[in-house]
């Protein structure tokens, strides 16, 4: 996963009023945590940050104005406007080179199970421990040809080298059952009865 480069400034004003003014000026308030350091309050460029966070688990390379040394950070909590869906605030976690992080990676299901079956998605994301510099963007799970009564577990999902599941391997990801069959046997009699009532 490629890094996204952002330039930030430090914030000296805090509170809801200061955050609103910051957003009106085209910036997004953020706080950086991690590795025992004091929280650092930042202002990120709103548009670039919004576009960057369209990608799940994006790794940000941030340079603070006045400091030539960039650092890596992973968004951990993103607060969005309830209606506009714009970003109101971000909590960032400082990442060191070579560090592994626990993240939720989306599952993408492909293929079709056998006809007459019902597919139940038990998980839509998989929690994994992965190198921060190479977090997968998705895991593709094929359900092609699965029959009723079958299922796939976390252990059935092929993971890239260096990535390991953060949940037990026997956790069910997707299960396949028999699709319910609608009983239409009484419909003609019911229709005839309705016709008789109407005729009376």
Image (spheres, rainbow, N blue to C red):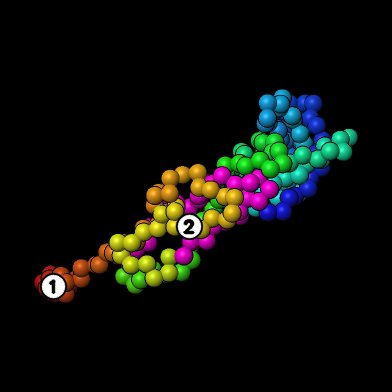
Tag 1 residue: 189
Can residue 50 be seen from the camera position used here? no
Magenta highlight range: 117-142
Mark closest to the chain's N terminus, 2 or 1 = 2
Say whether residue 125 is left or right of residue 57.
Answer: left
Q: Determine the residue positioned at 39% across, 52% down.
A: 172
Helix, strand or loop at label 1? It is helix
Seen from the viewer's position, the closer of residues 141 and 187 is 141
User: Height in image: 145 above or below 51?
Assistant: below
Q: Determine the residue positioned at 52% across, 61% down.
A: 140
User: Height in image: 116 above or below 91?
Assistant: below
Please provide percent x and percent y for residue 119: 37, 61
Q: Main secondary structure of the magenta part?
A: strand
- Between marks 2 and 1 in the image, the one whose residue lies nearer the viewer: 2
Residue 121: image quadrant is bottom left
Seen from the viewer's position, the closer of residues 101 and 59 is 101
Instruction: Count residues near mark 1 (Cα–Cα under 10 Å), then give few for <14, some for 14-19, many for 20+.
Output: few
Please provide percent x and percent y for residue 133: 68, 48
Helix, strand or loop at label 2? It is loop
Residue 93: image quadrant is top right
Please provide percent x and percent y for residue 49: 73, 46
């Amino acid at each position: 996963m490629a890094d996204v480069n952002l330039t930030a400034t430090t914030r000296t004003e805090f509170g809801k009023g200061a955050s609103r003014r910051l957003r009106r000026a085209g910036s997004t308030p953020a706080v950086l945590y991690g590795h025992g350091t004091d929280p650092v309050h930042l202002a990120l460029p709103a548009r670039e940050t919004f576009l960057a966070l369209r990608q799940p688990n994006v790794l940000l390379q941030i340079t603070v104005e006045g400091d030539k040394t960039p650092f890596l950070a992973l968004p951990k909590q993103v607060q969005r406007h309830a209606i506009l869906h714009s970003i109101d605030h971000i909590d960032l976690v400082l990442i060191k080179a070579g560090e592994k992080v626990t993240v939720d990676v989306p599952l993408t299901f492909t293929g079709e199970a056998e006809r007459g079956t019902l597919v139940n998605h038990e998980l839509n994301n998989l929690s994994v421990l992965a190198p921060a510099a190479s977090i997968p963007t998705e895991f593709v799970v094929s359900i092609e040809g699965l029959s009723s009564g079958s299922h796939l577990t976390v252990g059935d999902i092929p993971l890239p080298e260096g990535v390991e599941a953060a949940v037990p391997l026997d956790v069910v990801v997707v299960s396949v059952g028999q699709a319910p069959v609608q009983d239409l046997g009484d419909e003609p009699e019911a229709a005839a009865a309705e016709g008789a009532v109407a005729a009376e």
